[in-house]
Amino acid sequence: MKTLMAVFMALILMTASGCQSTKASKQGGIAPVNEQFNIVVPTSSTIKQGAGTTVTVSLNRGAYFKRDVKLAFETQGIHVAPNNVMVKASDTPDVFLQITADKDAAIGEYSVSVKGTPTSGEPTSVKFTVKVEAPEVVKSSTEAAK
């Protein structure tokens, strides 16, 4: 009978201790998981016809996101290099993208699409705008004197 009472009391104590609430962490849970990433692009960029510029595209990795990501760049009317790049989990998150416009590129705004595909998980994409302007006309010293 003493053994039965001891077992019964042990079960009551285990049940009671399991029902107590635990304090949640500031991140919203006991084992927070942030396995997401997003792509950070420039808000806009401007280049002259026949010229180019370098912009930075970055991966913003969540605290627990530890995968390689393939970035693919697409546009029409202007050129981007490289067209795609693999950003390893151990690499810095910045990719330097060279954007150029032909001398006869139409003046206007062009959209650059960036798609990030991780080695596992869902891809994400984002776009940014590049504005192509006419080059500045440099007057010769003879024309300026007139």
Image: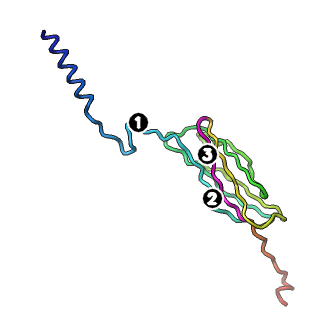
Residue marked by disc 2: 42
Residue at position x 53%, y 42% in the image: 36
Tag shown at residue 3: none
Residue neighbourhood size for the residue with mark 1, other residues' Cα within 10 Å, grouped as few (<14), some (14–19), many (≥20) = few
Q: How far apart are marks 3 and 2 (CA)?
A: 16 Å
When the figure is inspected, residue 109 is found, relative to residue 112, above or below; the finding is: below
In terms of sequence position, does the residue under pointer 3 or pointer 2 come before the other?
2
Residue marked by disc 3: 124
Q: Which amino acid does label 1 sit on?
A: Ala
Q: Position of residue 19 (x, y in %)?
A: 26, 31
* Label 3: element kind: strand
Residue neighbourhood size for the residue with mark 3, other residues' Cα within 10 Å, grouped as few (<14), some (14–19), many (≥20) = some
In terms of image quadrants, where is residue 43?
Answer: bottom right
Closer-to-camera residue (127/66): 127
In terms of sequence position, does the residue under pointer 1 or pointer 2 come before the other?
1
Residue at position x 67%, y 57% in the image: 55
- Quadrant (top left, top right, bottom left, bottom right) of the C terminus: bottom right
Q: How far apart are marks 3 and 1 (CA)?
A: 25 Å
* Label 1: element kind: loop
The span shown in magenta is 120-131
Tag shown at residue 31: 1
Of badges 3 and 1, nearer the viewer stands 3
Q: What residue type is labelled 2?
A: Pro
Q: Where is residue 144 in the image (x, y as percent from the top left)?
A: 82, 86
Residue at position x 30%, y 40% in the image: 23
Prevailing SS of the magenta stretch: strand
Of badges 3 and 2, nearer the viewer stands 3
**Residue furthest out toward the right:** 142
- For the residues bearing labels 1 and 2, Cβ distance under 8 angstroms: no
Magenta run includes residue 124 = yes
In terms of image quadrants, where is residue 67?
Answer: top right
